[in-house]
Every structure is written in structure tokens, then in C-alpha cells.
Amino acid sequence: MSNKDTMARFYEAMSAGNTGIVDEVLVEDFIEHDEFPGLPQTREGVKQFFEMSIAAFPDLNFRVLHIIEEGDISIGHALFEGTHEGDFMGVPGTGRRVSVPIADIVRFDSDGKGVEHWGVTDTGMMMQQLGVVPEPA
């Protein structure tokens, strides 16, 4: 299985609410380069983030647009989509749908497991879609 396939499998598992995929495809000493308030930058922190995301967006779906692979790096471009029904990063459920662009860069080891991750999420767009900040004029 290619690293690209592993990323696709990860998105599919998260869309199905299967956070167990984290332990399956990430090494134990995984390094998360994104900071999420209150969460460790570890494999366990990644699992906690997705548990929180699934609780807040029970119909969470990752619509994959592109996955590319070069050497030990794979990059995923997707949309984080779902209905905001529970608390997410301090914002109580709004009942609003979101569709937010994300990019994930993952370095894999020779066994095909994720070693580290860098990510970009359009949080400004998410806050606009949740009604926390106004749409630009």
C-alpha cells in the first residue's frame, strides 16, 4: 500500500467515525506540528482532536480533492464538511453546515506509517461559516 493510499484510508476512516485508525497508521512517537489548544502534539493528541471533531460534527466527512506523493511525503487537499451540533474549540453547536478547505502534509517511515504532520486549515472560513465572525463585505 502506498503512502497516498494510507492517507486516503485515513480520511475514509475519519469520515466513518473510526478514530482507531490513528493507532493503526501513525507511529507511537508521532510528532504533530500543528498546535491545538489543550491537546498534546502527539499521536494521542491527534486522536483527541478527531474525537472532539466527530463529537462536534457527527456527520463529519472529508471530501478528498487531491492526494499527491513524492518520496516519503504525501500531501492531501480536502474539504472538512459537516453539521456543527456540539462544542468545537469553544464554539457551542450552531446547527450550521461547514465546508472548509484543509491541507495535510505527512512524512512516512519505511514501514508506511505516519511519522509527522503539518497542516493548514482555513479557520477564518470555518468561523465565518459558524457565524462567529461576519462574512467580509
Image (tube, rainbow, N blue to C red):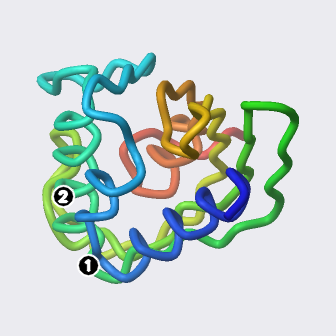
In this orientation, which residue lies closer to the viewer: 37 or 18? 18
Q: Which residue is mark 2?
A: 51
Distance from disc 1 to disc 2, alpha carbons, whole Å, reads 10 Å
Task: Assess disc 2: are there few (<14), some (14-19) or many (≥20) residues with their C-alpha within 10 Å of its C-alpha.
Answer: some
In the displayed structure image, the side of residue 131 where residue 87 appears, left or right = left
Q: Nearer the viewer, mark 1 or mark 2?
A: 2
Q: Looking at the figure, which quarter contains the C terminus? A: top right
Dot 1 alpha-carbon crowd within 10 angstroms: few under 14, some 14 to 19, many 20 or more: some
Where is residue 105 drawn, in percent x and y? 66, 33
Amino acid type indicated by mark 2: Glu
Q: Quick one: SS at disc 2?
A: helix
Disc number placed over residue 58 in the picture, else none: 1
Label drawn at residue 112: none
Image vertical order of residue 116 relative to residue 102, above or below: above
Q: Residue furthest front?
A: 111
Quarter of the image with the N terminus in it? bottom right
Q: Nearer the viewer, residue 117 or 72?
A: 72
The image position of residue 37, as x and y in percent, is 20, 22
Q: Could you tell me the amino acid type at mark 1?
A: Pro
Q: Name the spot of residue 100 as percent of width and height, x first.
A: 59, 55
Indicate whether 51 appears above or below 135. below
- Residue at 49%, 25% in the rendered image: 116
Q: Quadrant of residue 107?
A: top right
Q: Position of residue 33 (x, y in %)?
A: 44, 16
Name the residue: 68% across, 51% down. Answer: 3
Instruction: Determine whether, in the image, residue 25 is placed left or right of residue 67.
Output: left
